[in-house]
């Protein structure tokens, strides 16, 4: 017999990639004592060195990876039946990283140039542009950031030279 409901259900949470996380589960009491397994996205999890059940029912994930992102559920089972917990969402955040940095550009006076870069991360990072030359500031009115995060500089002048 599986008595009562789950004493503790897993909670939705976020973890930074590379960190450890524990999803807690307090299964219902029962006779015989229920065995606990976990599901991810509806499929029974195979526990290995990085994913393991600790303290009898909690799921410990070591060195979280983007592939761990998903819907988790604790399942208690004995000869009398099966009980499933509510679903908990695990979101694995990835720090922003540069895929392709902007490249140096040689431009003709009066021309228009575009600087682009490619970044990754989860959630997808915001991209900000700034001028790194001493005493230089972004030339307001001639510069804008496009929808794809490309920086467009119009009507290039000698003062635009630099970083």
Image (cartoon, rainbow, N blue to C red):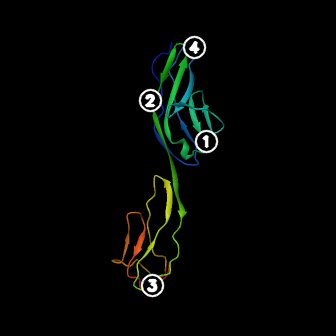
Foreground mark, 2 or 3, reads: 3
Badge nearest the viewer, 1 or 3: 3
First reached walking from the N terminus: tag 4 or tag 2: 4
Q: Which residue is mark 2?
A: 86
Q: Using the numbered discs, state the Cα–Cα distance from disc 4 to disc 3 in whole angstroms.
A: 81 Å
Q: Which residue is more in the foreground, 50 or 111?
A: 111
Query: Tag 1's secondary structure?
Result: loop
Residue assigned mark 1: 62
Give the residue at mark 4.
Answer: 32
Q: Is residue 162 above or below residue 47?
A: below
Q: Which residue is mark 3?
A: 108
Question: Is there a contact, CB below 8 Å, between mark 4 and mark 2?
Answer: no
Whole-angstrom CA distance, mark 1 to mark 2, is: 23 Å
Label 4 secondary element: loop
Report if the CB atoms under discs 1 and 3 are less than 8 Å apart: no
What is the spatial separation of the Cα atoms under label 1 and label 3, in whole angstroms? 53 Å
Kindly check if marks 1 and 2 are in contact, taking CB atoms under 8 A apart as contact: no
Q: CA distance from mark 2 to mark 3?
A: 62 Å
């Amino acid at each position: 017999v599986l008595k009562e409901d789950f004493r503790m259900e897993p909670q939705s949470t976020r973890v930074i990639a590379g960190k450890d996380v524990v999803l807690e589960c307090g299964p219902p009491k029962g006779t015989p004592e229920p065995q606990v397994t976990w599901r991810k996205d509806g499929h029974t999890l195979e526990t290995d060195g990085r994913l393991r059940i600790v303290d009898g029912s909690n799921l410990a994930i070591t060195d979280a990876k983007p592939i761990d992102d998903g819907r988790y559920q604790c399942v208690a089972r004995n000869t009398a039946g099966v009980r499933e917990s509510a679903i908990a969402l695990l979101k694995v955040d990835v720090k922003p990283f540069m895929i392709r940095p902007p490249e140096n550009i040689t431009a003709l006076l009066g021309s228009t140039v575009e600087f682009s870069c490619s970044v990754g991360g989860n959630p997808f990072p915001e991209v900000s542009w700034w001028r790194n030359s001493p005493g230089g500031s972004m030339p307001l009115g001639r510069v804008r950031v496009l929808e794809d995060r490309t920086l467009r500089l119009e009507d290039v002048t000698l003062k635009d030279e630099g970083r």
